[in-house]
């Protein structure tokens, strides 16, 4: 279960079918809106969600270029005020 704002939640489960074609079931509560997806449909949906998340993360990182620069400095061991380029 994934808890959202305003007492809403997303529940992801597997529904075992008699014919062996199991389904991915996504339930949105408290409205009990249900998506019943094949494995391929669920895979496509998850790929689209991941791509959207990546676009949001890239967009938000572009609005904070200074924070990214400071993180890079710490990673390579450069002290503040020193250049990372070798002379």
Image: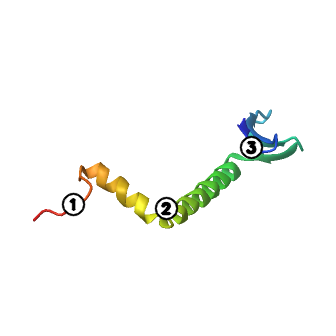
Left or right for 32, reference 39: right
Dot 2: few (<14), some (14–19), or many (≥20) neighbours within 10 Å? few
Which secondary structure, mark 3?
A: loop
Which secondary structure, mark 2?
A: helix
Using the image, tell me which numbered label, if any, was put on residue 4.
3
Q: Is residue 21 above or below residue 44?
A: above
At x 58%, y 61%, the residue is 56
Measured as percent of width and height from the top left, residue 5 is found at 76, 45
At x 41%, y 63%, the residue is 66
Q: Nearer the viewer, mark 1 or mark 3?
A: 1
Using the image, tell me which numbered label, if any, was put on residue 84.
1
Q: Earlier in the sequence, mark 2 or mark 1?
A: 2
Measured as percent of width and height from the top left, residue 73 is found at 30, 55
Measured as percent of width and height from the top left, residue 41 is found at 70, 52
- CA distance for labels 2 and 1: 21 Å
| Residue placed under numbered mark 2 in the picture | 61
Which secondary structure, mark 1?
A: loop
For residue 68, say whether it is visible. Answer: yes
Left or right for 45, reference 78: right
Left or right for 63, reference 86: right
């Amino acid at each position: 279960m994934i808890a959202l704002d305003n007492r809403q939640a997303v529940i992801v489960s597997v529904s075992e079918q008699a014919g062996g074609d199991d389904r991915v079931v996504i339930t949105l509560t408290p409205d009990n809106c249900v998506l019943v997806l094949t494995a391929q449909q669920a895979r496509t949906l998850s790929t689209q969600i991941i791509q959207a998340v990546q676009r949001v993360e890239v967009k938000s990182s572009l609005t904070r270029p200074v924070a990214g620069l400071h993180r890079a400095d710490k990673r390579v061991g450069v002290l503040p005020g020193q250049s990372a380029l070798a002379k």
